Image: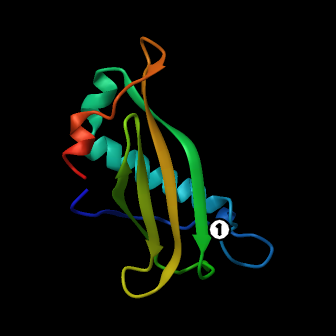
Amino acid sequence: MSQTFSTPIELRFSDLDLYGHVNSVVYFTYLETARVKLFQDFFHDMTARNIFTLVVRAECDYKLPILFGDSLIVSVNIGRIGTSSFDLDYRLHDGSEKTYATARTTMVCFDNVRKTTIPVPNSITTMA
């Protein structure tokens, strides 16, 4: 994706762990929130054609703890594109210079009618 999709994330008190920072597993919820918004805004035509994207791999490199009251933005770019899969690269940051984490999910394109993987649709490849 030549341009970056970004969305603010509202922190909830329930996101915090005993140490007072966002629990590591909650980061994946933030990635999901950004991913769903990205697909709603840019790739809603895929759902209408019964094309789903499935997360087959998720990884996160934690850089700094996110504390309650911090500003959080998740930015997403389309990275590697394969035959039937592609990567989404994420940056969790404060909108400025502070990066809390970087992450990646590998997505597989799936025809929900035929129940099989399919090539990455043009709507995704043209945005890369």
Residue 75 image-quadrant placement: bottom left
Vertical position of residue 97 compared to residue 21: above or below: below
Q: Residue furthest front?
A: 83
Give percent across and percent down for residue 37.
36, 49
Please state the total of marks drawn on the protein image: 1
| Identity of the residue drawn at 52% across and 58% down | 30
Residue 76 image-quadrant placement: bottom left
Observer-nearest residue: 107 or 28?
Answer: 107
Helix, strand or loop for disc 1: helix
Observer-nearest residue: 49 or 23?
Answer: 49
The quadrant in which the N terminus is found is bottom left
| Identity of the residue drawn at 52% across and 81% down | 70
Q: Residue furthest right?
A: 18
Q: In this view, does 11 lie to the left or right of 5?
A: right
Q: Is residue 53 left or right of residue 44?
A: right
* Residue behind mark 1: 13
| Identity of the residue drawn at 38% across and 42% down | 82
Give percent across and percent down for residue 92.
47, 71
| Identity of the residue drawn at 42% across and 12% down | 113
Q: In this figure, which colouring scheme has been used for the structure?
A: rainbow
Vertical position of residue 22 compared to residue 41: above or below: below
